[in-house]
Structures are given as C-alpha cells and as structure tokens.
Image (cartoon, grey):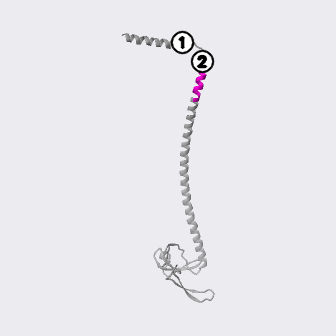
Amino acid sequence: MYKNKKVGTIGIIITTLILIALVLLTNVDIKNFSGAESFFNKLIMPIQNGLTYLKNKISGNDAFFYDINNLKEENKKLIEENNKLEEKLKELEIIKAENATLRSYNNMSSQYTEYKAVPAYIINKNISNLSDIMVINVGSNDGVGVNMPVITTEGLVGYTISVTNKTAKVQPIIDPGTSVSSAISTSRDSVVVKGILRK
C-alpha cells in the first residue's frame, strides 16, 4: 500500500514538472535562445551536409553502374555487328577470288579458241617427293575424260589420269612419271620433256 502511494506521488510530481516546463517554454521569448540555436545549427549542419553528400554519392554510383550496364549492352551489339561484317568480308573475298578465276578463265578461253575449256579448281594435292598428282573439282559429269590436257593461261599443266563423276586426277608435266613431246622454240627440233624428282 505504501509502495503504491509512493509511485503515485512520483507520477504526480513528474506530471507537475512537465506542466511547469511547458508553461515556462510558452511564456519565454525565443530570441533568448538564439545563441543556443546558432550553436546547434553549427553542430548539426556539417552532419547534415555530410549525409547529403553521401546520398548524392550513392545516387552517382547508381548512375555509374547503370552506365556500365549500358556499355556492356553496346559492346555486345558492337561484337555482333563486327561478326556480321567479318562474315560479309569473307563472302566478299570469296566473290573476289571467284571473279579473278572467271577473268582468268575468260582470258584463257579467248587464248585457246580452238578448244572447249572447262574451268576447274585444285581441291587436293599430293605433296610427297615421289608424285605431284593433283585432284580437280570437275569430272565426267562436266565432260572431262581420261588423258585430256589440263592447261592454264601460262601453258600446259598436265593431263587427266583418272576421272570420277565430279573429280579428276591430274598428273602434271613436272611429275617423274610424265613424258611430254615438245619443240624447241628457236630450232623447232622435237624433244621429249620428262618430269624429275624434286630435291
């Protein structure tokens, strides 16, 4: 019982002190506290400015990461465009090579008008020291047969030794197994030219 009275008395005292403080604060002129207010402003403003700086810095970092993501996307698009350009460049190189071959074939056709020429590419070559046989990409389907001459704009290359539907083996005149009749340009004497082993 005594304890309850003591607690109640303390509560009444605290309440009374709060009321007195409120009355004093409402009746006191605020100008008297301008010095204290200025002190607190000087104390709090640097903290507030620091927090504002940190906030702006964090916002700037967000923009930085956003820019990095944009750069990654742009880099990915540039890589894709570069790959497409490389593919187009390869196609252009193939077209240029085909164009050069067709020009060469056209020149050869005009040079050997008495022959029916079939353009061909070398698709395989024996690189051993015993043989120089080549494989070209035309065969019986293109009208090519065995023992037909193979020529370029610079002259005779060799002759076909075997033919499939789409390919033919060519034994060049420099192969050791080849002998070709020829004529010396100055004396017009007939000779036999034979291939030799490469050293």
Q: Is residue 35 magenta?
A: yes
Q: Is residue 67 visible?
A: yes
Marked residue nearer the N-terminal end (1 or 2): 1
Q: Position of residue 103 (x, y in %)?
A: 60, 72
Q: Position of residue 167 (x, y in %)?
A: 48, 74
Rendered image quadrant of residue 105: bottom right
Give yes or no for contact between labels 1 and 2 (Cβ–Cβ under 8 Å): no
Q: What residue range appears in magenta?
A: 30-46
Q: Relative to 81, say whether 130 is above or below.
A: below
Q: Main secondary structure of the magenta part?
A: helix
Q: Which residue is mark 2?
A: 33
Amino acid type of the residue tagged 1 in the rendering = Val
Q: Position of residue 29 (x, y in %)?
A: 60, 14
Q: Is residue 74 magenta?
A: no
Q: Relative to 129, say whether 56 is above or below.
A: above
Q: Position of residue 94 (x, y in %)?
A: 55, 66
Q: Quadrant of the N terminus?
A: top left
Q: Secondary structure at mark 2?
A: helix
Residue 23 circle label: 1
Q: Is residue 149 visible?
A: no
Q: Relative to 101, say whether 56 is above or below.
A: above
Mark 2 packing: few (<14 Cα in 10 Å), some, or many (20+)? few
Amino acid type of the residue tagged 2 in the rendering = Phe
Mark 1 packing: few (<14 Cα in 10 Å), some, or many (20+)? few
Left or right for 59, reference 1: right
Which residue is found at the position 56% from the left and 58% from the top? 85
Which residue is found at the position 57% from the left and 39% from the top? 60
Disc 1 and disc 2: Cα gap in Å?
Answer: 16 Å
Residue 181 circle label: none
Q: How many marks?
A: 2
Which residue is found at the position 58% from the left and 26% from the top? 43
Which of labels 1 and 2 is toward the front? 2
